[in-house]
Amino acid sequence: MQTKILLQESDIPTQWYNVIADMPNPPAPPLGPDGKPVGPDALAAIFPDNIIEQEVSGERWIDIPEPVREAWRLWRPSPLYRAHRLERALGTPAKIYYKNEAVSPAGSHKPNTAVAQAYYNKVAGINRLTTETGAGQWGCSLALAGQLFGLDVRVYMVKISYEQKPYRRSMMQTWGAEVYASPTDMTESGRKILAAHPDSPGSLGIAISEAAEEAAGRADTNYSLGSVLNHVLLHQTVIGQEAKAQLALVGDYPDEVYAPCGGGSNFGGIAFPFFADKAAGKDVRLIAVEPTSCPTLTKGQYAYDYGDAIGLTPLLKMHTLGHDFVPPGIHAGGLRYHGDSPLVSQLHNEGLVDAVAIPQLETFEAGVLFARTEAIVPAPESNHAVAAVIRSARECAKSGEPKTILFNLSGHGHFDMSAYDRYFNNELEDYDFPAEAIAESLAHLPGVGR
Ligand SMILES: Cc1ncc(COP(=O)(O)O)c(C=O)c1O
């Protein structure tokens, strides 16, 4: 009875899969505040040309540079597991597989793109990067990638996560990055937020404003984003390609593919290579899992909105709760984002990608069951996928249907134990759907491109 399905280092994919080539409609273009499409040069103040090229490419396959594959070999290929013990605990006829992205040095899928982005900036002659981080996983990943390719990294860390996860900050510093709790008084964006909300817990949208503002104002500095944009999801398709090859080794193929969804990068990463088959007629469901307190895909509007809180970025067509929505302080910090990947949003809007929202307590209950059966303590973000998989596997137990289920275990929770503590002490709560706050921020949508 095989548990781990492993690939060799030589099996690491040599190309990324670009879902745009198989989408039924071209992606909605980014717009300027005047409602007119912006060209690639609108991004040139903060991104290098080689990344902008990927952001707008329609090519189905894009070569992965050898130095990126070489850095990936520190932890890739990641193992695919068959969750025998979880299946037994659930008494389900379903087969559950999970791709374990927690094996990376930073503990999640995020280094897959961090390494690529650091490499592309380095070859473009950039020596310094700014970024935001929510849970700290992305900041750690970029700090690590900066070390590997010789770039300085400054991280704006969402204040509530900075306070909840001091050791994530230490880890970023260990890999040489500077870390500040956002909102700071170092940027115009941060000062604006602090003037209106001196006690702001921060949000990914605010931290993005600060990091992007700084990069736009300095010639030696670029900005690096951990999710949402097309090139980030592209880089993450290494996950789904490996998973497909691993499932083929055991003669299996999923009926359902799940991943937690914040900005959409690990979901796109595992799901898009399967979308290629879906576009060719294969019956496979792709399901993004989000928190009920920040229900971007399930309750947000599909509209043009800013990617950051202040409105510095081009307008992206995406499912959004409004760029100034500050989500409740749930422990899955990486899922506290008002928007979502435009690619995932468009596919969801076209009925090709499904979404489900799960309350916080159910996700921790699922994570604890997973830890007690499969041994790995998942990140709170990953617990969302675990909970959705458990729901589906329990349905299979009732119906007798032997589905094959795949999910992405996007990260481990070793820096999230205070959240588990709070769960065990009954101090965690299910936030109500913040209907009023969302209605108010949706009223501030820029109103272009309708
Ligand atoms: C472990 C983990 N999973 C999931 C996410 C959500 O991000 P994304 O939707 O870009 O994969 C994050 C983001 O920080 C994360 O750290």
Image (cartoon, rainbow, N blue to C red):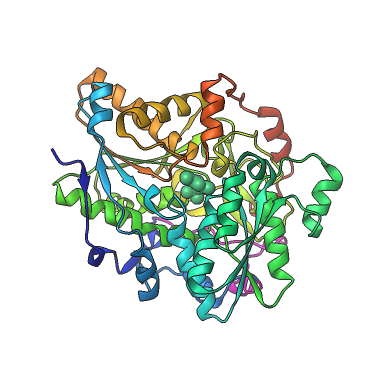
Which is nearer the eye, 31 or 84?
84
The quarter of the picture where the N terminus appears is top left
Q: Nearer the viewer, residue 450 or 407?
A: 407
Residue drawn where x is 51% and y is 30% of the image = 420
Residue 195 is situated, as x and y percent measured from the top left of the image, at 86, 47
Query: Residue 198 occupies which quadrant of the picture?
Result: top right
In the shown orientation, is residue 373 left or right of residue 424? left
In the rendered image, the residue lying farthest to the right is 195
In the image, residue 399 above or below residue 447: above
Task: Decide if residue 234 is in sight here.
Answer: no
* Relative side of 185 to 438, left or right: right
Provide residue 89's location: percent of width, then percent of height.
Answer: 27, 23
Image: magenta residue range: 24-45
Q: Residue at x 37, y 58 (%)?
A: 237
Side of 247 relative to 102 (left or right): left
Q: Specify the principal SS of the magenta part.
A: loop
Residue at x 39%, y 68% (from the top left corner): 71
